[in-house]
Amino acid sequence: MTGKIMLAVAIGVGLGLLLPSEISSASTMLLNIGLCVLLFFVGIDIGRNKTILQTIKRSGIFFIMVPLGTAVGSIGGAMIAGLFLGYPVNEAGAVGAGFGWYTLSAIIIAPYQAELSVLAFLTNIMREIIAILTIPILAKRLGHIAAIAPSGATAMDTTLPIISKHTSGETAVLAFATGLILSLMVPVLVPFILKL
C-alpha cells in the first residue's frame, strides 16, 4: 500500500509539472472531494467497531498521552534541529508545531516570514511522506501506538487508512482522536510559539 501511495504521489507531481495551471486549480476541488470520500470509508471502517466509546474508555491515559507526547516530541525535536541549523528556537518550534498540517502552518507563518513559511510547508510535507513510509515498520517493530506519532495531525485524515491497515480498530480510533486534538492545537500553538 505504501508503494502505491508513493507511486500515486510521483505520478501526481509529474502531471502537475506537465499540465497547464488552469487544470491545477480544479485539482484542489478534486483533492477535497477525494479526501472526503476517503474519510467517509475510513469512518465506515471505524464504525463497524460497535464499541467505539468502550475503545476510547479502554485507551485511558493513552487518549491524552499520545497527542501530548506527539506534540512535545514534535516541537522539542524541531527546536533542537533548529539549533543545529541556525534557526531561532521559536521559529523552529513554530515549524514543528505544524504537526504535519502543511497548508495551515505555512499560512499562519507567512505574515511572519516568507522563508519560514516555505520551510514549514516543506517540513510538514516531508513529515507526512515519512509517516506514510514508516507506519508499517513502526507498527510491526515498536507496536501500534508508536505508529500514530509520525503522522501528527494527519493521523485523522490522510495517514489514517495506513494506520488502520497496519494496526487495529482500537488504534485507528486513538489515531483519529490524536489527529483531531493536534489539528485543534496548530492554530493556537504556531502563533503562540512565534511570539516567544
Image (cartoon, rainbow, N blue to C red):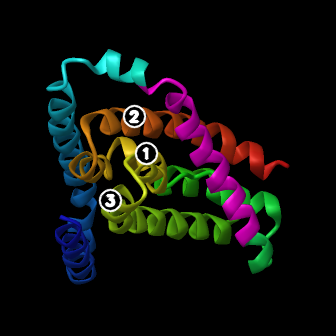
Residue carrying label 1: 145
Residue drawn at the location 68% of the way across and 42% of the way down? 189
- Judge whether residue 112 is colored magenta: no
On residue 82, the disc is none
Q: Quadrant of residue 191?
A: top right
Q: Are marks 3 and 1 in contact (CB under 8 Å)?
A: no
- Under circle 3, the secondary element is helix
Residue 77 lies, in percent from the top left, at 68, 62
Give the CA separation, mark 3 to mark 1.
11 Å
Q: Which label sits in the foreground, 2 or 1? A: 1
- Judge whether residue 68 is colored magenta: yes
Residue type at mark 1?
Answer: Ile
Q: Is residue 162 left or right of residue 81?
A: left
| Relative to 132, residue 51 above or below | above
Residue carrying label 3: 140
- Prevailing secondary structure of the magenta residues: helix
Of the two numbered discs 3 and 1 on the same chain, state the one appearing first in sequence: 3
Q: Over which residues does the magenta segment extend? A: 59-81
Of the two numbered discs 2 and 1 on the same chain, state the one appearing first in sequence: 1
Residue type at mark 3?
Answer: Lys
Q: Is residue 13 left or right of residue 107?
A: left
Residue carrying label 2: 174
| Relative to 152, residue 131 above or below | below
